[in-house]
Amino acid sequence: MMQPQIAPARFHLSFPLWVFGGISCAMIFAFGATTALWALDPRVIDGVSVWAKPLKFELALAIHAGTIALVVSRLRPSLQAGAFMQGVAFAFLAACTIEMGWIIFQASQGQHSHFNNSTAFHRAMFSVMAFAAVIITGAAAAVAFQIWRDPDFATGSTVKTGILVGLVGGTILTLVTAFAIGGRGSPYVGDVPLLTSRMMFTGWSLTGGDLRVAHFLATHMMQAVPIAAVLAIWARIGFFATYFVLGFAALWTVWVLVEFNVALSGEPALFFVLRS
């Protein structure tokens, strides 16, 4: 049986679509500007440029907001523009403004934005950032709820399943790994690695436990599983497409949990071990 084709996006320029798409575009622009600042500003924190953290967060948020924008564009117009999605979009906008504003401001001051216990104000801001991060991540699950409610969602059933599983699973795993990092007060398990024993750009430890690896995989489950669903449709595997997507999501979840437990044991990520 032929799989249904993926329908084109519904170009209804609702407020939520403007917000998610606009934030993605803004973060791409900010990424370019921050790259220039990295090249021009010689200041460092913990041996890396003060602009390294804003750069990573801008790229991650551009992908996250862009993913949500693409998914929202396939909702029926009444759900796109409804009060629920408008509330989600407004909360997302406010959370992103707080999160990225503080990260960029602290970078400009040459100070840590995360795990900064230097003053009561900085400790309070870290708590505010944690709350904002929950809203940013949880927006994906909120959008998934709207997809579930939409019988006319503009994709076939396999892709719809992939999007639902990817967004909900990615949200849950991201929050689990993020709270573990926040609760420990550091992504590292054991001694903080030297600059020479960290992965370029990400800063992941090459010699010890680093919970950010599992956190990264958890977050990008939101893109990986829907992409797997699209590939399953293109491969024309018919009846087995949905099972392929569910199996892929299960394996991705296992990968996240394995890397999470490996990091908690103080060991480097599996793909670092296998590569060596």
Image: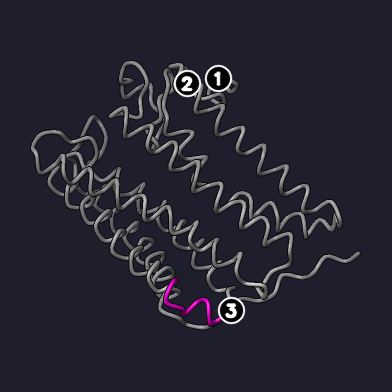
Q: Are marks 2 and 1 in contact (CB under 8 Å)?
A: yes
Q: Secondary structure at mark 1?
A: helix
Question: Which residue is located at x 23 percent, y 49 percent?
Answer: 128
Q: Which residues are magenta?
A: 77-84
Mark number displayed over residue 76:
3
Q: Position of residue 111 (x, y in %)?
A: 15, 40
Q: Quadrant of residue 195?
A: top left
Number of the front mark, 2 or 3: 3
Q: Which residue is label 1 attached to?
A: 273
Q: Quadrant of the N terminus?
A: bottom right
Is 157 displayed left or right of 116 in the figure?
Answer: right
The residue lying at 49 percent from left, 68 percent from top is: 69
Q: Amino acid at mark 2?
A: Pro
- Above or below residue 77? Residue 154 is above
Q: Which label is found at residue 268?
A: 2
Relative placement, left or right, of 29 versus 275 is left
- CA separation, marks 2 and 1? 7 Å
The C terminus: image quadrant:
top right
